[in-house]
Amino acid sequence: MNGIGWAGGLGFLALLAVTGGGARAAGCTMTAGGPETVIEAVILTDTADPRPGRVVVDARGMIACVGATCQARMAHPRVIRCPADSLSPGLINPHDHIAYTGDAPRPDTGERFVHRHDWRKGLEGHAMRDPAPDHDPEVIAWGELRFLISGITAMVGGDMAPGLVRNMDFGTGLDGLPMRPVTYRIFPLDDASGVMRTRDCNYGPHPADPADVASSTAFLAHVAEGTGDAARNEFRCLSSTTYDRVPQPGGGGVSQDLMQPNMTILHGVGLTTANLETVRRQGGAIVWSPRSNLSLYGRTLDVMTARRMGIPLALGTDWLPSGSMNMSREFACAMRYNRRHLGAALSARDLWRMATGGGARAVHAETMLGAIAPGHVADLALFRPAGDDPFDAVVRGRPAAIDMVMRGGRILYGDAALVAGLDLPGCEALDVTGQRKALCIRTDQPFAFAMLRADMARKRLYPVVADGTPPDEPPCDTLDDTAARTRP
């Protein structure tokens, strides 16, 4: 096991001094300058055959030009040449619970559930498995670093640390984006107490209503997280004005139609084909979290039916206890499920699209994020090649194979030689599973990595990165797979 800050002690992290002005990294050359940046790489746009080209990032951190002949408008720009790398929009993670950064996954026992309240509240004979959140800003920052070094530049997570990835559900976390934060609702039926219904909508007294959705930039809500009729009933109560018209004493109890174009469903494991058709017709989106779904329920969203219908799909990690530690591992689960159960129907480009344009659509920021296009914010990541398909560089990539992560034109993570050659301020160098990398995070947030690393080691938190499969990583198996694996 080799990684940054693994809970076993400090020996897995090597802080290295970034010195000198080297102008060459593995596969890349660079020239210091500024305030504009020119990047030369294979540019990933939503086309089947991406081509090499240039992207010019202006002094405001916006993409000014994309194409083979783009030129900086100012003298002496910073130039990054990585001709074999894939340049992708920064990845967007629209579903996580970042306050559970400190809750490591447990060894898998093969136990699976029918509804989220089964494990949250210990129902139906199950032991309660709902961990406690930790809102310590350092813990949140540690979790965001896990995401940042896997190429994520924006997320929705219910909590935030300043100056790392964009936090789309906090006004102060938008980092200057001209939009209102999204609404993130874990219990849209006000059912946190664990109430489950199958034939009416008698949940809590204060469910979300259509006005809540209509007034939101995007309304992201957990819906149908489970495989049984109690999960499907949630959708009935959130998509119909006629299903239940009898109010409860004290409030709630009436079905309402929240399926609007700015509605984004999280999970949707229990959605039927008819339900998915309603989502499609009403213009909603869905965030797919395969690892967490499979590890908890042994089933996941009917992703192929949703895709055939044209429903916008995004990819989300959910949380550490049952999901993926970063987007690299969520890609790994999606690819495994795709290969074993979908006949490899999803291409690397399809999965890349979910993590970029699909994520931007889920938070309704597609005019600013999720694409490499003039007028978009320069949230970008450079991935080293991983086969003949340029999209494979992203979906098969690892933090060690990422040469640069940029948010709003600011380089926050990358190859140590590349960062040193650009003479960036406030950087600390580190070893990531044998690759020399650098973090440049001190410009706009309070935590030095060395301080975070030491504090998280004392707390014995899960590592920022792992070499290979992370410790006790939740499985990515269906119920049938699990039965076969655990059968005597």
Image (cartoon, rainbow, N blue to C red):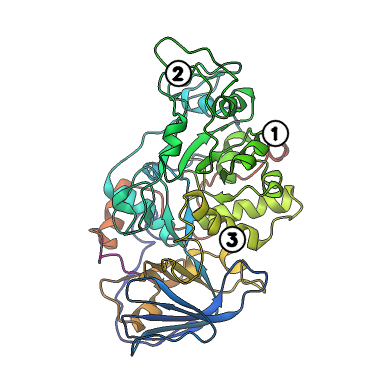
Q: Amino acid at mark 2?
A: Gly
Residue in front for this viewpoint, 408 or 417: 408
Q: Is residue 287 magenta?
A: no
Answer with left or right where residue 278 lies relative to residue 323: right
Q: Secondary structure at mark 3?
A: helix
Residue 73: give x, y in percent of width and height: 37, 85
Residue positioned 70% across, 33% down in the render: 274
Give above or below for 374 relative to 347.
below
Helix or strand or loop: what does disc 1 sit on? Answer: helix
Q: Nearer the viewer, residue 26 or 388?
A: 388
| Earlier-in-chain disc, 2 versus 1 | 2
Camera-near label (3 vs 2) is: 2
Q: CA distance from mark 3 to mark 1?
A: 27 Å
Residue type at mark 3: give it: Trp
Residue bearing mark 1: 274
Query: Residue 341 placed where, x, y %?
Result: 73, 47
Question: In the drawing, does residue 481 fall left or right of residue 123?
Answer: right
- Residue segment shown in magenta: 438-444
Q: Nearer the viewer, mark 3 or mark 1?
A: 1
Q: Quadrant of the C terminus?
A: top right
Residue 442 part of the magenta-drawn span: yes
Q: Quadrant of residue 187?
A: top left
Specify few, some or many for label 2: CA neighbours under 10 Å numbering under 14, 14-19, or 20 or more: many
The answer, for residue 469, to whether it is visible in the render is no
